[in-house]
Image (spheres, rainbow, N blue to C red):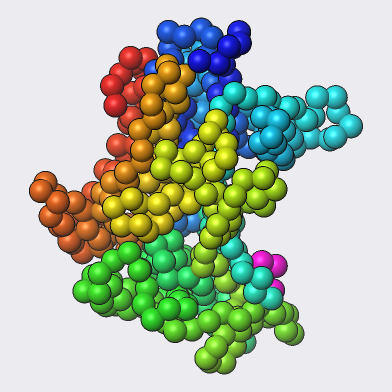
Amino acid sequence: MVNKKHIDIVVLGAGYGGISCVTRLSRKFRKRQDIRIHLVDRNTYHLLETRLHERAVRQEEITLPLSSFLSRRPNVVFHLGEVTLIDLEHRRVELDFGISRTTEGAARQIRYDYLVIALGSKTNFYQIPGLETHAFQLKELEDSERIREHTERMFAIAASETNRNKRKEYLRFVIGGGGLTGVELAAEMVARFDDLSARYHIDASEAEMLLIELSDRILPSLDGKQVLRSVEAMQAMGIQILTKTRVTGMEESDGKLLVLRQPGDPIPTRTMIWTGGIRISDLIRKSGAKTGAQGRVQVDRFLRVINYEEVFAIGDNALAINPSTGNVVPTAAQFALQQGFLTADNLYRTIQGKDAKPYHPRVLGEIVSLGKHLAVGWTVLPLGKRFRFLSFIGSLLKRAISERHVLLLWRERQNWTGHW
């Protein structure tokens, strides 16, 4: 037990890991007036990041206002701001409210007894020349809005363009990265091409979608047969898949953009969306925490930051190891949720003077949307068997998983003592 008037638990980030951790903490400590839980995020909403590709195409609601389900949690204090400093040695974090530094109170320090780092990740452009300057990314709500508006703008401009080559540039869309995000976005976007073509009186066959992947296959989390079926489905949609192709840069020439690649000639386009990798904020590395691949924090088997037992890292931030395989746990929402719940349980046990429980990830499956009405993937059945699919049922299953997460949060809002 910490001997002080209040025990302050600070959770940085309201993504899947952070929000699941705060939700469970607030319930477990509902009878403890000496426990204060602080949630820090730069947005006033929880973003359903696994559905960003949907928002990039249509007006889907993919956010939940934090105030709606934190209002009945008197032991949770929400801090709106950007984390600018994590000082592990002195147990404090610093926030910037995003307003003028000359304004009194623009920055704030929060001291903690326990800290949970769940800040998510950023797009990794791998220092490829011109890529960060010219390419779109898909990590935030604003990114999806920009892509949706830009896509329609390209069709609108192409409708009155008489130069055939320029017209092709406007209607050629390139996505870099053949992982889950890139594939889902490509499938969603081509499904919208027919609508936009009809709206602006354009022959639908003129619109092109190119998906570029460095390795020899897309969707590394699926088995070979499922990848083959996915490729066939995507090619039937009109998506051109270029594997074993490296994006080497982007440059502007004579008013047009060129995507440079090896092998192959430059691709003239007005739209490049990069989904080729993630990195963790340098803020975490500068905190003094030991980091590994992609800048992820090295943690022990309880998800505690090495050398700092009062600090936990979860989700994309944690370089967690699966003890059953010895492999690094992937960055995925299902693991972030599990880690958030476990960290809340371990904080509760620690403050109660009990031993923490080690992390054992549960792999529930992998589902990849191929447009609004089709999905490919697998899920775990009883007795550990896998059920594989490429069907409309798969899309329903993926939506059900997303809705279950939302329903659990809303249930907690209505019922303080609800069970998980």
Query: Does residue 334 lie above or below 154 as drawn?
Result: above
229 on left or right of 42: left
- Could one spot residue 63 in this view of the protein? no
Q: Nearer the viewer, residue 112 or 310?
A: 310
Query: Residue 300, percent across and down?
Result: 46, 43
Q: Nearer the viewer, residue 15 or 167?
A: 15
Q: Residue furthest left?
A: 383
208 on left or right of 158: left
Q: Which residue is located at x 45 percent, y 40 percent?
A: 303
Q: Which residue is located at x 36 percent, y 77 percent?
A: 217
Residue 149 covered by magenta stretch? no
Query: Residue 144, percent across and down?
Result: 53, 54
Please report the bounds of the magenta region as a residue range: 130-134
Q: Which residue is located at x 43 percent, y 61 percent?
A: 181
Residue 279 location, quadrant: bottom right
- Could one spot residue 53 in this view of the protein? yes
23 on left or right of 372: right
Q: Nearer the viewer, residue 358 or 153?
A: 358
Query: Does residue 41 lie above or below 73 as drawn?
Result: below
